[in-house]
Image (cartoon, rainbow, N blue to C red):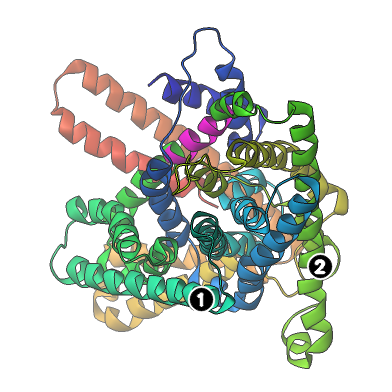
Amino acid sequence: MALFFFMAMLFVVSQRFKISYPILLVVGGLAISFIPGMPQISINPDMVFLVFLPPLLFEAAWYTSWNSFWKNRRSILTMGFGLVFVTSLAVAYISVSLIPGFTLALGFLLGGIISPPDAVAATSVLKGVNIPKRGITLLEGESLVNDAASLTVFRMALAVIMTGAFTMEEAVVGFFTLAIMGVFVGLVIGNILYFFLRYIAKSSSITTPITLIAPYIMYIVAEHFEWSGVLAVVSGGLFLSFRTKDFMNYHTRIQATEVWETVAFLLNGFVFILIGLELPIIIEGIESVSKEWALNIALIITGAIVVVRIGFIYAASYIPYLLSKKIRRKESHPGWKMPLVLGWAGMRGVVSLASALAIPIYLTNGQHFPHRNLILFITFVVILITLVVQGLSLPWLIKAVKLEGNSEELPEAAQIEAIRYRLVKEEMKVLQTKYAKELEESNTLKAINLQLKRSLEATATNLSSEAKIKLANERGLYKKVMQDLIDVRRKIIYDMVAEKIYDESVLRSLEHNLDLEESRLNRK
């Protein structure tokens, strides 16, 4: 409970100083661990994998645009799978050359642990920063698939270390079995839940809890058969999010959004603060080598994975573009700014922590797992350095290179105006055709039609620059006046609560309507 309290306080500080909250939570956790009398907290890795990972992956998949994911599938899959394997390979050979007694299997184990970036860290850093939408899509899409790839490398390397046996054929077959069957499990369970939610459970009281349970069902079933629980959760989450319009109404969507935002924040915050708390414990566990030497090795490996990521993303951006006429027709020139920003946005986080903690203490023969504490230390340093250094400098880098959207990328404001224009036109068409007779007789419908007409005229799609400025000023005044009126109404409701004349449940309902109205008012 004390950690949750610290987490809330640190989040408030991060909002005040506009610092990404994962960065502040890691640093804050590290500071808390040095408080005299603070008990050492050791977390079970199974708890991280089972309790934290499924809902965080599901939440990321739920809010991922399937259309954007599919449109950028080549880049996402290349970064999600190819970059993980290249990073693991580089880390394996670098660590073997630097660390005495370090085997190639241990190198791949370490590579599988530290290869996947954390999308939560990247997207939280990028909030409020002007970056093309495609950049966010690539980072979020990459995180959905790279976790599965990295955990597969980790699992295979761990099996080699524990058993001493490895064949390339088994590794390849094992990878595709894990991936394909994991996706299969996720889609099967997703379809079952979809049928239940659409045709049986038509209530927000049960729909939202089922969305909370869904990722755990998908993950546990897939892992029971030793398939990829990560891909099961991701595929099932993408499927259900794509079909939400069939089983969710406005009330359910509002409720589910609020619940998931709270759950995701608490889980992410708790894991990031644990990263800082665990570091001193890991440092104390390093006994066979000096801490200075271990830190130097960790810094070298951190620098290597940053360089590998930037180099790989440049290669993955330019080589297909230069070799394929089809890609050149469909996509604009990648330039040098976007690959640099994507390469620098490789902050590590939750999955790396969970994988590192999942390393067993003993081998099957009863001996201590070789270099376990050193691997844990390197992992924690990589997480800390990439989060703090890259996280704090990423907004500065974006501003320094003046990264802007592609010319074919329609600005968000223009999209909103175009959508509003089309919606109002269709509304007026329905009103004037379906309710033509009532429109002539009813003052209420006349008022609705007049309101729609004014809304259509207020759409800035075809206005001149001067008219757009005037319209923006009018909207600003409208927003200010409406906000004042909402504040007055809310104060009156609070006064009525104190008077104890009206039923409090009725007043709460009215207050909720005000909340929705204020939400619409402040929406872009």
Residue 270 is inside the magenta segment: yes
Q: Is residue 411 above or below residue 169?
A: above
For image coordinates 20% across by 73% down, the residue present is 195
Q: Secondary structure at mark 2?
A: helix
* First of labels 1, 2 by sequence position: 1
Question: Which of the 4 image quadrants contains residue 226?
Answer: bottom left
Q: Residue 184: percent from the left, percent from the top?
A: 36, 76
Residue 51 seen in this snapshot: yes
Q: Which mark is residue 314?
A: 2
Q: Residue 236: percent from the left, percent from the top?
A: 36, 67
For image coordinates 72% across by 55% down, the residue present is 91
Per the model, the C-alpha gap separating discs 1 and 2 is 32 Å
Q: Answer few, some or many: residues within 10 Å of disc 1's Cα (few below 14, many 20 plus, some between 14 and 19).
A: few
- Number of marks in picture: 2
Residue holding disc 1: 170
Q: Main secondary structure of the magenta part?
A: helix
Residue sitting farthest toward the bottom:
325
Q: Answer few, some or many: residues within 10 Å of disc 2's Cα (few below 14, many 20 plus, some between 14 and 19).
A: many
Question: Given the image, on which type of amino acid does mark 2 rest?
Answer: Tyr
What's drawn in magenta, residue-wise? 267-276
Q: Is residue 235 above or below residue 102?
A: below
Instruction: Please give left or right for residue 498 compared with residue 63 in the image.
Output: left
Q: Residue 31: percent from the left, percent from the top?
A: 61, 19
Q: Nearer the viewer, residue 204 or 477?
A: 204
Q: Which mark is residue 396?
A: none
Residue sitting farthest toward the top:
36
